[in-house]
Image (cartoon, rainbow, N blue to C red):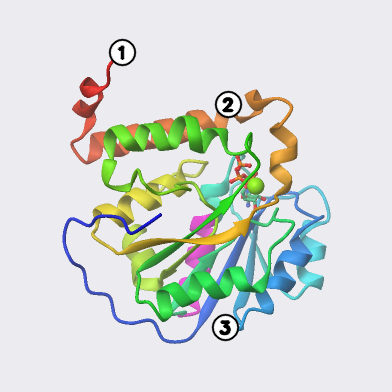
């Protein structure tokens, strides 16, 4: 666990007060309300946005009842987590926050302290981006362990030490999000790792913080058949390889013994 190495020092104004928490959500009626409630109880009293990917269950109703503003992604695409995050950032920028936080909406044990920790790391400790790390079931996170971390070790060793490169729990200063948005960000599962790589390559200061154990609903869907994660795996792998090409590191592949 530690700080990503940075190629050059970038100065970002210290963050002041206003925080927006964004939940990307697709069919999360069971957990969205408790997630919103937990976020609202954070000591930073954030505004909460839910970016709905055209859920077919009661996610939207539950989110509104819990007091969130709900915004729909323009296109109906799935997987569309990237599109949801980009839509969320556009909406957030209109509201001029100092810090923007993303949290997954399938978390069953989200507590206000998770948001407090992520925000404090940016607001009080002065990091540009703070990323959540957690303990998970041993068979959870196969794409993280077998794809993201392995490819990052090959192409971006300076961030390979991060425990959860695909974490959905991330806080950063608004100028950092704006800077990352200058890159063409993917619509699908590749977005988390592209944001991480771009943030590190731009020289922003990144820290991971421990949030405890993460219980999340999506794990139940694939724990009996990890093959259900094929699309995520493909998109994350493609995103890292494309980033390696962009940053002139594609030849690192020749250093891997086969
Ligand atoms: N708006 C929108 N949100 C999505 C879409 N796909 C996933 N999400 C949300 O993105 C968040 C992360 O999705 P999960 O399915 O939990 O995936 P994950 O936990 O990152 O990955 P695993 O650890 O492999 O389960 C959740 O809040 C989902 O509801 C989508 O197509 N549109
Ligand atoms: Mg999940």
User: Callout 1: helix, strand or loop?
Assistant: loop
Q: Residue furthest top?
A: 258
Q: Residue at x 60, y 54 (%)?
A: 73
Of the residues tagged 3 and 2, which is closer to the observer?
3
Residue ID for mark 1: 258
Is tag 3's residue or tag 2's residue first in the polypeptide sequence?
A: 3
Quarter holding the N terminus is: bottom left
Is tag 2's residue or tag 1's residue first in the polypeptide sequence?
A: 2
In the picture shown, does residue 243 fall above or below 52? above
Front in this rendered view, residue 130 or 94: 130
Q: Is 249 a magenta residue? A: no
Quarter holding the C terminus is: top left
Determine crowd level at label 3: few under 14, some 14-19, many 20+ residues with C-alpha closer than 10 A.
some
Provide the residue span drawn in magenta.
Answer: 85-96
Residue ID for mark 2: 230
* Spatial separation of the CA atoms under disc 2 and disc 1: 23 Å
Q: Position of residue 27 (x, y in %)?
A: 75, 49
Q: Residue at x 66, y 51 (%)?
A: 53
């Amino acid at each position: 666990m530690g700080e990503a190495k940075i190629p050059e020092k970038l100065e970002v104004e210290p963050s002041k007060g206003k925080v927006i928490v964004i939940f990307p959500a697709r069919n999360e009626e069971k957990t969205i309300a408790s997630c919103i409630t937990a976020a609202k109880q954070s000591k930073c009293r954030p505004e909460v946005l839910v970016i709905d990917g055209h859920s077919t269950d009661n996610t939207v109703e539950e989110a509104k009842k819990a007091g969130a503003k709900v915004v729909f992604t323009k296109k109906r695409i799935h997987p569309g987590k990237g599109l949801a995050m980009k839509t969320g950032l556009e909406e957030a920028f209109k509201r001029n926050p100092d810090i923007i936080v993303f949290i997954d909406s399938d978390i069953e044990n989200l507590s206000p302290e998770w948001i407090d920790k992520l925000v404090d790391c940016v607001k009080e400790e002065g990091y540009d981006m703070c990323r959540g790390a957690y303990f998970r079931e041993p068979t959870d996170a196969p794409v993280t362990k077998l794809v993201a971390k392995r490819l990052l070790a090959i192409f971006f060793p300076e961030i390979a030490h991060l425990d959860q490169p695909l974490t959905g729990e991330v806080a950063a200063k608004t100028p950092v999000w704006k800077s990352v948005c200058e890159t063409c960000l993917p619509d699908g599962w590749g977005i988390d790792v592209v944001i991480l790589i771009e943030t590190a390559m731009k020289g922003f200061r990144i820290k991971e913080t421990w949030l405890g154990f993460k219980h999340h609903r999506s794990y139940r869907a694939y724990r009996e058949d990890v093959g259900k994660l094929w699309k995520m795996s493909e998109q994350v792998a493609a995103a890292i390889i494309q980033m390696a090409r962009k940053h002139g590191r594609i030849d690192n592949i020749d250093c891997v013994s086969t």
